[in-house]
Image (tube, rainbow, N blue to C red):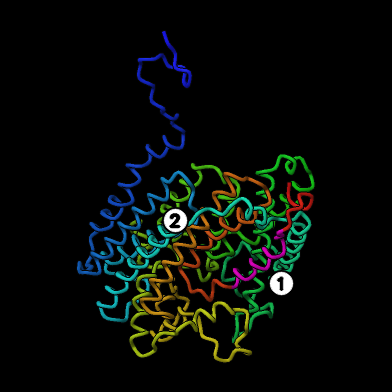
Amino acid sequence: MAVDARGGVPSGLPAPLDVPPVSPRAVLSRALAVPLVLGLVFFLPVLVAVLPGPGIRDEAYWLQLVLTGYAGARLAAMTLTTRRRLIQGSFWLFVYVAMGVAPLAQAVLGQTPTPVVGTRSDLVLAVSLSLVGCVAFDVGVLLARHRPVLRTRVRRRTASVSRRRLYLLVALAYAASALFVIKLGGPSVFFSSRQEISEGIQSSGVASAESHVGSAFLRGFGTVPALLAFLFLTRWLVTSRTARRRPSVLLVWTGLLGVNALVNNPVSNPRYWFLTVMFSILFTAFPKSPVMYRAALAMGVVAALLLFPFMDRFRYDENGQRPVESASAFDPLVRKDYDQIGMFANTITFVDSGAGHAYGRQLAASTFFFVPRSVWHGKPLDSGVRVGQWMGMQNTNLSSPLWAELWLDFGPVGMAGGFLGLGYLCARADRRYTLRTLDDPQPGHVLAIVIPVVAGYAFILLRGPLLQASGRIGIALVCLALVTTFRSDPRRLLR
């Protein structure tokens, strides 16, 4: 019987099909696809929509239902993708919960965490523009797919971590966290309440009634260097067998684990910051695990709906604590945290009332957050405070989602363009992250730490206000500049 020289197949017989082996990742995707899509796109929105309540079923309600379904479909796509898209996954997780399910429950139950002071048409416009921003984000992602990957020649100049610089960051982390603990009166205060933390910062003398720059720097330097140093060491241990054999590295890593358990615990920190800590640690410790990635996104929905409201107990001490009372799992969504759609509508009303657009002044205040008001006399307040004061709210610690920030500064065209650019940048960053963790898993890649941190911090940036979120960003940039080198000398890099 004649045999074909190319493949060893007997002549006259059809060649066998080239069927690639089915990977566990593909099996997992197929098993999750149907229940995940049905749950996010249909089951949960319908479960909320059929709740008994006096809400008005008008254009705002139906647009909100469309936005929830759209975000659910995109979140399901991010969860089932063959490559991890950390920042895009965080974006759609936030949109689905904070801009989708939560405001849908508020529309059905007829209750809002923050009063919507404008007309119903402003609320309709807010929901419509939220959907426009999401579509623009997806368009930016599509545009990013057509850009070729950078060549290997450029990769050699990739930012890497120097051992000596990493040791400097570790020293800074220990010193800054120690100063933070001493200024607040000792370790015990970090396990009491966020109210006591704020009072400790005020009594330390670093903050004033006119400016919170000192408070932001103290809290930021006490928490951010410790987290970044811990992440870099974790990455080093995960990807380098040599590092795991060094007792000194393990000892420093264990010490930083204890420091983070003290200064970055969920009792003394805002819930969104603790979410940043957990996401960044999870994605750094398990960079190649599709199970961890999918579990983080899927369980993020459950945690946001059920766990987040009950973590509010840590905000107050025993005398000032407000107990969480809930008749159903959806009741907390109408009382706290999820006021993004309502505040977007209030921002639209605020602009139309005569305040007008800021044309970049709000963004400038967020960029130069470190300039105190005693120097910059006309420095704008953060957007949530501005709108809250105009509304006559006693508590002006209100959210200002990125949609509202862009609308307040640049109007509808600027908002759409901002989300188009955001989608493009997020897609490019996710693509580069995949190359750095799967195709080139070296211990010292800075991008392998930056992307998980950005993915976690995206919840804070999307919720806003940007001015409140800028402090930790500035400190993180200082820390990254401290450890980053563009030299290709292997003796100085992590191995």
Label whose residue precedes the other's in the sequence (1 or 2): 2
Q: Which residue occupies the foreground of this view, 425 or 119?
A: 425
Q: Which residue occupies the foreground of this view, 387 or 84?
A: 84
The quadrant in which residue 217 appears is bottom right
Residue 304 on image: x %, y %: 43, 57
**Which residue does the image show at 28% across and 64% down from the upper left?**
64
Q: What stretch is highlighted in magenta?
A: 471-486
Residue 413 on image: x %, y %: 37, 76
Answer left or right for 102 relative to 184: left
Labelled pair 1, 2 in contact (Cβ < 8 Å): no
**Which residue does the image show at 35% across and 19% down from the upper left?**
14
Answer left or right for 6 relative to 208: left
**What residue type is disc 1 on?**
Lys
- Residue 60 versus residue 121 in the image, above or below: above
- Residue 205's tag is none
Crowd class of label 1 (few under 14; some 14 to 19; many from 20; radius 10 Å): some
The answer to whether residue 325 of the structure is visible from this angle is no
Name the residue that disc number 1 marks. Answer: 183
Q: Is mark 2 on a helix, strand or loop?
A: loop
Residue 201 on image: x %, y %: 64, 75
Name the residue that disc number 2 marks. Answer: 146
Residue 476 located within the stretch drawn in magenta: yes
> How far is the residue under mark 1 from the one under mark 2?
51 Å
Q: Main secondary structure of the magenta part?
A: helix
Name, please, the residue furthest toward the top. 1
**What residue type is disc 2 on?**
His
How many numbered markers are drawn? 2
Crowd class of label 2 (few under 14; some 14 to 19; many from 20; radius 10 Å): few
The answer to whether residue 425 of the structure is visible from this angle is yes
Residue 295 on image: x %, y %: 46, 46
